[in-house]
Image (tube, coloured by chain):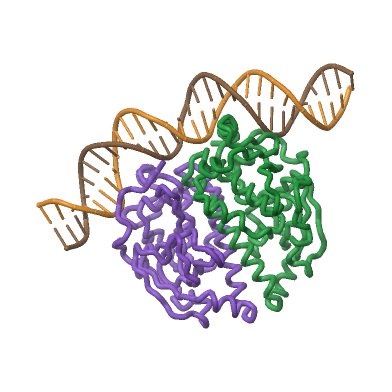
Chain colours: A green, B purple, C orange, D brown
Amino acid sequence: MSRRRGRRQEPQDTTPASVAEGAAISTEQHRLIARYHSGDREIEAGRDLFSIGWTGKSIFNLLHGWVAVYTLLEDGRRQIVQFALPGAILGVLPSRRGSSTIGAQALTDVTVSVIPASVLATHARTEPEICLRLVQSLARDCNLAFDHLTSIGRRSARERVAHLLLELFTRYRAQWPGNRIEEMTLPLTQEQIGDATGLTFVHVNRVLSAMRKEGIVQFHYRRLRILDPDRLIEVAGVDPETALGWLERRPWT
Amino acid sequence: MSRRRGRRQEPQDTTPASVAEGAAISTEQHRLIARYHSGDREIEAGRDLFSIGWTGKSIFNLLHGWVAVYTLLEDGRRQIVQFALPGAILGVLPSRRGSSTIGAQALTDVTVSVIPASVLATHARTEPEICLRLVQSLARDCNLAFDHLTSIGRRSARERVAHLLLELFTRYRAQWPGNRIEEMTLPLTQEQIGDATGLTFVHVNRVLSAMRKEGIVQFHYRRLRILDPDRLIEVAGVDPETALGWLERRPWT
DNA sequence: CGCTGAGTTGAAACATGTCAACCGGTGTGG
DNA sequence: CCACACCGGTTGACATGTTTCAACTCAGCG
């Protein structure tokens, strides 16, 4: 039942996500809780920002890079439940007591701003902005999770993969406004796409091959090229209106 | 690809979820934003609290009954993304502008407290409690959504159904503390279980039949009886520790 | 009494998983 | 500098879980 491929977990060489491709949103624009951070931290690609069982009491504001949030079953099956982009807030969920049931893996080299939970607790009442920001971030995460749920639950493999690529592309492009090139560095392996879509990496490969042959998208070694946006939208099964809605999204998240 | 069964949507006879089975948490305990509600509203079983496309500007505090939050694909495929129990907060997500991409259907007769979004907007700054409460509710929803994601993405049909039953049972029982009977009214059809687990109602039926024959659970016409809790936990593939964690959850949500 | 919603069951079709072999690139250590 | 290991990707043959289609039951209700 789709165990993971026998590979080491630790290192991973990944070219940084940011190539000069347009006018990017600056790192500082992502730092939306500037005042209280207790310092920035850098994590190299492949490492965990925090792992399952983590008992730390901090939350993280992702400033740069990509992060995959995942869960694990006892026998090694893995599910990626969220892809976090700059601006995202991570680590809120592991509710107070107890340890985190989710892990967060850096897909690229990553820099986060660390905010002690204590700060949050003491200032939440006096500084409503923080709280509102949290609500916004969580609502967005929830919405995305719901999208993924319907994707995994009710779409075919082909639709799921198309949907994911489309989502990540539009979210990414929202960070590079004005850039119209249908191409990007997508710092994922096919196995990770499988972990996010509930498929096997073998099957992801087949789906991607098919879509490449049909001239819809091309995804090779972390380079994603969208050859036929309209057909991709069609295969993903989102109405173009929604797709446009995605493009309007705020830069953060 | 698993369209819905050709049935009318509207009415639905459902016995109310609350039977006298122990010391329930009172309705007032669920009303956590008491001050600002603009009145309560009752929705009968089967009706939508709000539907996809809804543009209203209210949020709802569920006081009594069960609600299923769902999404729809163009061709009628449906995915239930959340089950809301008393105490839950609904309708936060449909972000300001634009219409809701999710719907909420009453599974039983339901009463909600309606809170105009405007109230929220004006008081969020002055009354941090509201905001904190929202964060808590959203974080919980997000966590549950992540659980469901890994269930649908990586578990077998059998595991998924077991997992869902276990989750709903523990969440329900948290509302009736002190009650130790492994039995409850679960106001769902097998089709709705399918919509939540990403399966066909036919297959849900087969799985349930099998588990009944094996003496694990019994689910017939909205009556759920857990015959062998340990085996259910085992089949669901959660470690007992986590299962206990569920039981510790706050009454609301 | 017929209708409808929900559940049940069997047979066959199909999507996806499993297993296994192989390729090319890259880093590493002898 | 070569040999080797390993990662990520690719492909084929086959196994299997789940869906699809269809028929039938049962209960409630007008």
Residue, x 35% and y 70% (percent of image)? B20
Q: How many marks?
A: 0
**Between B19 and B94, the one nearer to me in the picture:** B94
Residue, x 52% and y 62% (percent of image)? B247
Residue, x 37% and y 70% (percent of image)? B43
**Between B35 and B165, the one nearer to me in the picture:** B35
Residue C2 location (% of width, % of height): 13, 51
Above or below B120: residue B202: above
**Between A150 and B61, the one nearer to me in the picture:** A150
**Quadrant where the C terminus of chain A lies?**
bottom right
Does the rendering let one see residue B154? no
Residue, x 45% and y 64% (percent of image)? B54
- A21 with respect to B107 (left or right): right
**Quadrant where the N terminus of chain A lies?**
top right
| Residue B188 occupies quadrant | bottom left
- B22 with respect to A145 (left or right): left
Does the rendering let one see residue B61? yes
Above or below B252: residue B40: below
Residue B208 location (% of width, % of height): 38, 46
Above or below A41: residue D11: above
- B19 with respect to B243 (left or right): left
| Residue A79 occupies quadrant | top right
- A59 with respect to B208 (left or right): right
Residue A119 location (% of width, % of height): 75, 70
Residue B152 location (% of width, % of height): 51, 47
